[in-house]
Image: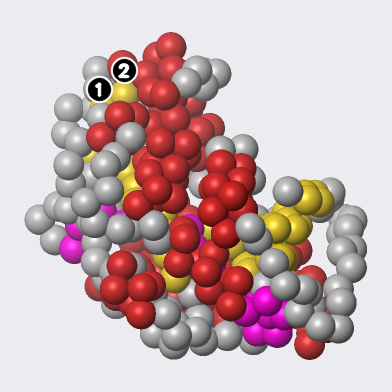
Amino acid sequence: MKSTHLLAGALTAIVATSAAAEGELNLYSSRHYDTDERLYTDFEDATGITINRIEGKADELIARMESEGANSPADILLTVDTSRLARAKNAGILQAIDSALLEEKIPTNLQDSDNQWFGFSQRARIVFFDKEDVTNPPATYLDLAKPDYKGQVCIRSSTNTYNQTLLASIVTHHGEDIAKDWAAGVVANMARAPQGGDTDQLRGVISGECEIAVSNSYYFARSIRKDVKGVSDKRDMLGWVFPSQDAEGAHMNLSGGGVAAHAPNKDNAIKFLEYLASDQAQQYFSNGNDEFPVVSDVELAPSVSALGSFKADTVVLSDVAKNIPTAQKIFNEVNWK
């Protein structure tokens, strides 16, 4: 496998030929997980197709594909979160594809309405809390804005895509006015200014800086599977809630991909997306990266099943994506840093 990494501020070029290179696939990926290597090598072994990989931050890859235009060698964009998939579609760098297999195996709500992207793994957005200090944790996302939790909440910044999609889903379910009130309430309840990643929110509860935190499920599940500094050794002090179980269900962040608009190896690109929907690949997402598969009846990794069963939100993510600009506007209006 050929692998090229994008360093900050520097994009490394790959050579594009004028004709499609038979037996190759040019993958642009912002997934940065070492365990994905198994996905790629198994696809290569099964198909004989060589993957040429470019890795970088999602925004860098999207900008690169835009600048490359019709000369882009990209066949696939693989990235994390609905907001980035929507951004790629709106930038015109993806194309609609026909795949009966993907239509059958990927739940409809996890597909783009125009078949330009498909989801392949999920993470639940969970409320974690200090079991000793919090006896009545928030049962819903809206509860996070209640005055009862003033000064208790750790959560990431408004520029975080997970939070952007969460707020967009609240707009979708409850309308803009309620969503704005919620965002303002959460700001009022923050124990500290937003900082760090999801793991840092868990550490905030463990350190006593806050009593409640919002984090994606796989950051906690990872601390079950392997040692995560500042989390694993104190994990037992954390309780968790899958929010809104009597309403829409827990919000799910998506990892997914689509075929590039000018893919020189389109057939190979579709084969790769179909492979990601296979039971084998779906198990890798769970076992290797503590994610929830999107295909039904795929066995969960022990670290994931330890979180327990729950009701997931089945809102159509294409609809949520349309409300992401509204979510960002709300964040700005309520001064969510």
The outermost residue toward the left is: 246
Residue 219: name its quadrant: top left
Across and down, in percent, residue 203 comes to: 48, 26
Indicate whether 177 appears above or below 187.
below
Q: Quadrant of the C terminus?
A: bottom right
Q: Which residue does the numbered mark 2 point to in the structure image?
A: 237
Report how far apart the C-alphas of labels 1 and 2 lie in the structure.
6 Å
Q: Which residue does the numbered mark 1 point to in the structure image?
A: 131
The reply, left or right, for residue 155 in relation to residue 309 is right
Across and down, in percent, residue 102 comes to: 38, 72
The reply, left or right, for residue 34 in relation to residue 225 is right
Indicate whether 106 appears above or below 304.
below
Q: Residues within 10 Å of mark 1 (few under 14, many from 20)?
A: some
Q: Is residue 262 magenta?
A: yes
What are the residue bounds of the magenta stretch? 248-266
Q: Amino acid at mark 1?
A: Lys
Residue at 24 percent across and 56 percent down: it is: 296
Secondary element type, mark 1: loop
